[in-house]
Amino acid sequence: MSELKFATRLNSFASGAHLYWPGQQGKPSVLQMIERASTVEGLTHLDLNYPQHITTDIPALRKRIEDVGLAVNGMQMRWDAPEFKIGAFTNPNPEIRRKAIELTKRGIDAGREFGSTLMTLWMGQDGFDYCFQADYKKIWNDAVSAVREIAEYAPDVDISIEYKPNEPRAFAIFPNVTTCLIAVEEAGCPNLGITLDFAHVLYANEIPAYAAAMVSRRSRLLGLDCNDGWGKRDDGLMVASVNPKATLEFLWQMKRDGYQGAYYFDTFPDASGLDPVREAQANIATVKRLLKLCEKLDDNQALHAAISQQDAVASQLIINDIMFAQ
């Protein structure tokens, strides 16, 4: 499985900074987090938040990432400035909305300099909190037209929408797979697609494999955030730590649909005081093991027959034998 790409959330490697960098005051730098991430056995790529992680000139940052044996998988937009709190693409102020769009274009340009052709849009600021706060049709049109403009700006780059039901806004403009698919269809650009975050999908009360199947049917799965959770919030727990069967089904669905992207770990070791290096290595080992199990599912005619008949008893017994073999 040496051809597999494993990427990670860079900010995870600020976890336990006082233990890894004794005596250091303040948060670790981007370069320090990159150095620490490079110690994860099997890790191949990083995702960078734009503009937060661009703290030095891009050629120097790219060289440092390459020097430690990693590459950039994609850029992740973050509109964290205070003026974006009530919206980036849906901000009621046309000047601020324009600023958000242009900032995203600069993020795409930065990604090209790292050799990346993937930009992920998690539009957490775009949504609403109160009844009678927003003109729903207008903010929808603003969001879709912004996504379209960005996709048309960079036809050589994959632009992927990552959805989440809420947080920081009470209701997100794109809260689930259905709204994302509608938005992608309305925008009408061939380089648009969707990123599925496993914990976000659970949080949206969706079945991960079903969401993946719908994306494959109507669009393209451009990104995958591997993690887990209890479905009550965005937990960002280790892969398959809560829902191993759902994770296996999710990976199998993606594999059958031809997913070729990175397995990106969007997990929060800092929330539980975990060593991020050990946590990342556990995630990699888990995904590799589950992908090997997927190979057993591919050729299991009894499983295919059970699924064709929607025979849940038979399919559960088969999966149990595969997953829990003595």
Image (cartoon, grey):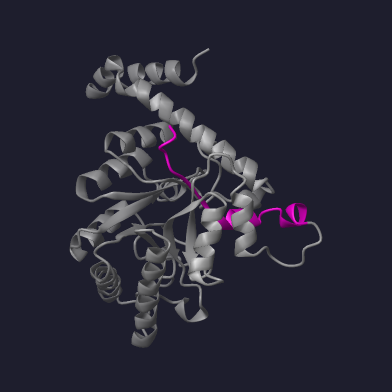
Quadrant position of residue 145: bottom left
Of residue 158 and residue 204, the one placed in the foreground of this image is 158
- Asked whether, in this view, residue 78 is left or right of residue 118, the answer is right
Asked if residue 66 is among those painted magenta in the image, a careful observer would answer no
- Asked whether, in this view, residue 188 is left or right of residue 276, the answer is left
Residue 83: where, in percent of width, then height? Answer: 47, 81
Asked if residue 11 is among those painted magenta in the image, a careful observer would answer yes
- Asked whether, in this view, residue 144 is left or right of residue 60, the answer is left
Tell which residue pokes out farthest to the top in this image: 326
Of residue 272 and residue 109, the one placed in the foreground of this image is 109
Q: Is residue 177 visible?
A: yes
Tell which residue pokes out farthest to the right in this image: 23
* Residue found 27% across the figure and 38% down from its top: 257
Q: Is residue 207 visible?
A: no
Residue 304: where, in percent of width, then height? Answer: 26, 21
Of residue 244 and residue 120, the one placed in the foreground of this image is 120
Residue 280: where, in percent of width, then height? Answer: 57, 43
In the image, residue 317 sits, relative to residue 254, either above or below, namely above
* Residue found 40% across the figure and 51% down from its top: 204
Which residues lie in the magenta part? 1-21
* Residue found 34% across the figure and 61% down from its top: 174
In the image, residue 251 sits, relative to residue 90, either above or below, namely above
In the image, residue 134 sits, relative to residue 230, either above or below, namely below
The quarter of the rendered structure image containing the N terminus is: top left
Residue 155: where, in percent of width, then height? Answer: 24, 64
* Residue found 31% across the figure and 41% down from its top: 259
